[in-house]
Amino acid sequence: MANDKKMVEAITSMEDDFAQWYTDVVKKADLVSYSSVKGCTIFKPAGYAIWENIQKELDARFKETGVENVYMPMFIPESLLQKEKDHVEGFAPEVAWVTHGGLNKLQERMCVRPTSETLFCDFYKDDIQSYRDLPKVYNQWCSVVRWEKETRPFLRSREFLWQEGHTAHATAEEAEERTVQMLNLYADFCEEVLAIPVVRGQKTEKEKFAGAKATYTIEALMHDGKALQSGTSHNFGDGFAKAFDIQYTDKNNKLQYVHQTSWGMTTRLIGAVIMVHGDNSGLVLPPRIAPTQVMVVPIMQNKEGVLDRAKALQEELAKVCRVKIDDSDKKPGYKYAEQEMRGIPLRVEIGPKDIEAGQCVVVRRDNGEKQIVKLDEIAGLIPQLLEAVQKNLFEKAKAHRDAHIYDAHDYMEFKNIVEEKPGFIRGMWCGEQACEDKIKEDTTATSRCMPFKDQEKISDVCVCCGKPAKKLIYWGKAY
Amino acid sequence: MANDKKMVEAITSMEDDFAQWYTDVVKKADLVSYSSVKGCTIFKPAGYAIWENIQKELDARFKETGVENVYMPMFIPESLLQKEKDHVEGFAPEVAWVTHGGLNKLQERMCVRPTSETLFCDFYKDDIQSYRDLPKVYNQWCSVVRWEKETRPFLRSREFLWQEGHTAHATAEEAEERTVQMLNLYADFCEEVLAIPVVRGQKTEKEKFAGAKATYTIEALMHDGKALQSGTSHNFGDGFAKAFDIQYTDKNNKLQYVHQTSWGMTTRLIGAVIMVHGDNSGLVLPPRIAPTQVMVVPIMQNKEGVLDRAKALQEELAKVCRVKIDDSDKKPGYKYAEQEMRGIPLRVEIGPKDIEAGQCVVVRRDNGEKQIVKLDEIAGLIPQLLEAVQKNLFEKAKAHRDAHIYDAHDYMEFKNIVEEKPGFIRGMWCGEQACEDKIKEDTTATSRCMPFKDQEKISDVCVCCGKPAKKLIYWGKAY
């Protein structure tokens, strides 16, 4: 069988070279293809189907909280982008500019949206008149463009897919509530659907979104000990409202500025799934987002009756899960390796002897466990097994994450941990950007967030400068 | 009550000015908003939700035929766009050009995709090696950009949403089969889901897609007698394959060019729904794509028990349809007008007297029919009523379409019909583009299609030049 496992042998082991392992998995699991358009990737069916499942699940959760979907133009006139000072400073250096339409030069150049705050604000300015028009809780699914210099599939790309929610509220309290609500929705989604544990917290001034009053974030830990920002939710206060003059008449007939939020999740999440759950046999997909949850593999399929029975089994299982059958003319060992590489949670093997014995063999992708199951019990068992895989993936990821959180009490200890122990570092901070800058320069680690929970005082002084500490911070190298 | 119907009174009647009626409906039904980006519209929740339902239904039908979704970059480098001669000639004059990324001028400018044949071809060139890799039946949902001079919501916009399928096959027969299959899928979708009858046929050389060997189309007739091309499916033969060098090794180990197709449907369909089913009270939505199918309107809702009972009714109906309740403080007459303007198929009125009598009143949007229904029978009846509305809308549209098809036997008759009787004109054609050009110049009517069915010979000579006729054509003015 080992000979058939060529696919597996071709990937670099994650311990040897994590970056190369990642690239190998992305390619061998057939998720993306590089395109002739520099810095942009092509989502192949196996990759895009994961995004479709993420969309479906996330969109349903949005709608339960009253979110309505809309669609804004993909272009932003330069004058519109420039209306909010911090925002334009953050994004102008990395946008793509459209200068010609057809054969004519445009009177005003436009960028392809890097994010759509300015478009939503311009729209809300006219659409919101009275308190009766509030709140607006809109979202759009689209692609955005940021002219990155270095790119990696899913993690950093010149064009990427995402959703961006943009809301407007009558009061500051309501805006804050929505900001927190969406961050929690993101965190629950990551933990319940992607099986990825996250730390919820607030970004520092240095790390917050261009134009925001406050940015909340969820941070996940990848298998190599680097952090990945997995979703952010921003409270803009009335900053954008003032820049764009978005006012409403309140119940007392007085003009008031609205308070706004925005929040987004992207195709980065697919990168997170790969780097949290994947192993040296390839991708490992949590059942809830796996496009195929079960692969039926017939053994000795040319023997009479085997393929028919396997297909009947597939049909039966189709009622309880997303199932496919691999009836290609490849050898079983190759089929196993392929199913493993593609991260399909369960494999069901069925051959002549199994059929005779009224049974089949079920193999879990997450831990390799095999069990023999009676054919008349398999349809009942599969949903339970998928749940068990889902749960185990989360627990494994959480155990790994928790085992890679370290406390640093002074700068020497901090620097040693960064060098020797990849993971999150908990360390106190004085509140000065100078310390963040110094830490980044010395170690490349950045402040990931000030966690909402567990804001304990592990030391009285800043881990960098030794001055009185204000906040506990999760630090780490990040993607 | 008439006083409350301000919304309705504000729209122009379709008989007075169809174009203005259309604009009024689009605006009053809250489907779109104009944006600061010239020629681009904003899809508001009521408009986007229709597109979401179209997507859901169409995507499910695609997947049943083996279509897999992917995502390609939104940019096309100029050199790539230029690879197929006819194609670039067709699209280059109307694309938007990106010339700068961030602060730097690009070495090669790129256009925002007007359609993605060139990107798919570039991808297939590397992805297809052997007959085992075929067929490829890929599709993407995205937006595309064409720098139109005159724009109208849904019908013609500089950016619009669509799906574009791109397939590659081993043989010419298989490509032809897929081209026809998708056209029929589109036609069935229009008739069964949008309740819009269509004529299926082939475009002439003059009207076919840039770079295609053959273009098939479905043509619908709007209420004002103008045609709307509602979906197209193209067979490229091996033209693109030769331009892009897409070859595969067949079973005999010989290199062969692939045969390709592409097919697309767009947000124009929403325009078609408006112009086929709408009336002077506003939008009329077919139940299968109506985001809200039933609106419950409580009468005298401040009377004790009314709102509770109405909400209980809404909850009960939520099990069988998409239902909302209008419990705003507006007057019932205004609520009725609003429900009518938004095209919601059914309205359920419930007031104190109804509750006492154990009944409610159901009003159909399509024909105004009212009926009193027992409260314990309403949940069973609603699905039947929605089906009845769906069926009636199709039949009404078909009767209107069929009553507006005219036969022309000579050019005088043709010109008279174009002037006096808006609709489809059936007329014979010699096969020469010169006649299409002349007809367009004289009358603004164009050849919509050569119908697959009913290719009868209604005359021996071309309706324009009098030379021997080759094909029956549906002519008409078109959007």
Image (tube, coloured by chain):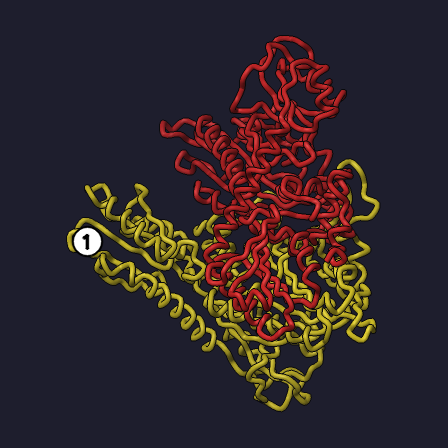
Chain colours: A red, B yellow
Q: Which of A461 and A340 is in front in this view?
A: A340
Position in image of residue B315 (x %, y %): 31, 50
Position in image of residue A53 (x %, y %): 56, 50
Single out the residue that lies furthest toward the bottom.
B460
Q: Quadrant of residue B281?
A: bottom left
Position in image of residue B128 (x %, y %): 76, 63
On the question of residue A108 being in view, the answer is no
Which residue does the numbered mark 1 point to in the structure image? B354
Q: Residue at x 64, y 13 (%)?
A: A462
- Mark 1 belongs to chain: B
Q: Which of A230 and B357 is in front in this view?
A: A230
Q: Which of A359 and A11 is in front in this view?
A: A359
**Secondary structure of residue under mark 1:** helix
Q: Which residue is drawn at 37% across and 59% down?
A: B345
Q: In this view, does A462 lie above or below B1?
A: above
Q: How many marks?
A: 1
Q: Quadrant of the C terminus of chain A?
A: top right
Left/right of residue B90 with respect to residue A125 in the rendered view: right
Q: Quadrant of residue B80?
A: bottom right
Single out the residue that lies furthest toward the top.
A467
Q: Residues within 10 Å of mark 1 (few under 14, many from 20)?
A: some
Q: Quadrant of the N terminus of chain A?
A: bottom right
Q: In which quarter of the image is residue A433?
A: top right
Q: Which residue is drawn at 55% across and 45% down?
A: A140
On the question of residue B390 being in view, the answer is yes
Q: Which residue is drawn at 60% across and 25% down?
A: A449
Left/right of residue B354 with respect to residue A232 in the rendered view: left
Q: In this view, does A365 lie above or below B304?
A: below
> What is the three-letter code of the residue carrying label 1?
Asp
